[in-house]
Amino acid sequence: MPKYNRTFELSVEDVDLIEEALRARGRELCQTRRALSDENPAHLESIGVIERDQRAGEELLGRLHDQKIFYRPKAAVYVGG
């Protein structure tokens, strides 16, 4: 049985590309979901699948976001914006 690689060497650009691809996929799913009608029983199963896919993508984006370390200077007062 194969083992999973538990260490990854991704650059910041790689992570940005993954995030952008997930956002693009989310936009595609959103457009598809809007095209389907809640009133048509034939669409209900498709809507459920689309919404599960959207949720999984958003959760993955959230996990990627939670692993980032944001810069905040320690010596000076931080002014955001």
Image (cartoon, helix red, strand yellow):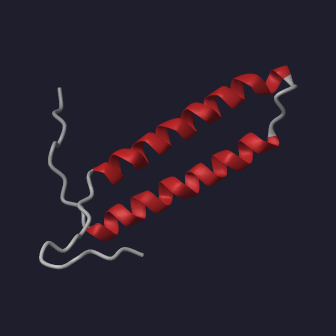
Give the x, y percent position of residue 64: 34, 51
- Residue at coordinates 49% horizontally, 58% vertically from top-left? 21
Q: Is residue 62 left or right of residue 75?
A: right
Q: Which quadrant: the C terminus?
A: bottom left
Q: Which residue is at the far left?
A: 75
Give the x, y percent position of residue 63: 34, 45
- Residue at coordinates 42% horizontally, 49% vertically from top-left? 61
Q: Which quadrant: the N terminus?
A: top left
Q: Which residue is at the far top?
A: 41
Give the x, y percent position of residue 74: 14, 72
- Residue at coordinates 17% horizontally, 43% vertically from top-left? 5
Q: Which residue is at the far bottom?
A: 76
Q: Is residue 15 left or right of residue 25?
A: left
Quadrant in the picture for residue 38 = top right
Give the x, y percent position of residue 46: 70, 29
Q: Which residue is at the far right?
A: 39
Q: Nearer the viewer, residue 17 or 3?
A: 17
- Residue at coordinates 19% horizontally, 37% vertically from top-left? 4
Quadrant in the picture for residue 16 = bottom left
The correct choice, above or below, for 51 with respect to 35 in the image is above
Q: Is residue 42 left or right of residue 55?
A: right
The correct choice, above or below, for 71 with respect to 21 in the image is below
Q: Nearer the viewer, residue 34 or 2?
A: 34
The correct choice, above or below, for 2 with respect to 12 in the image is above
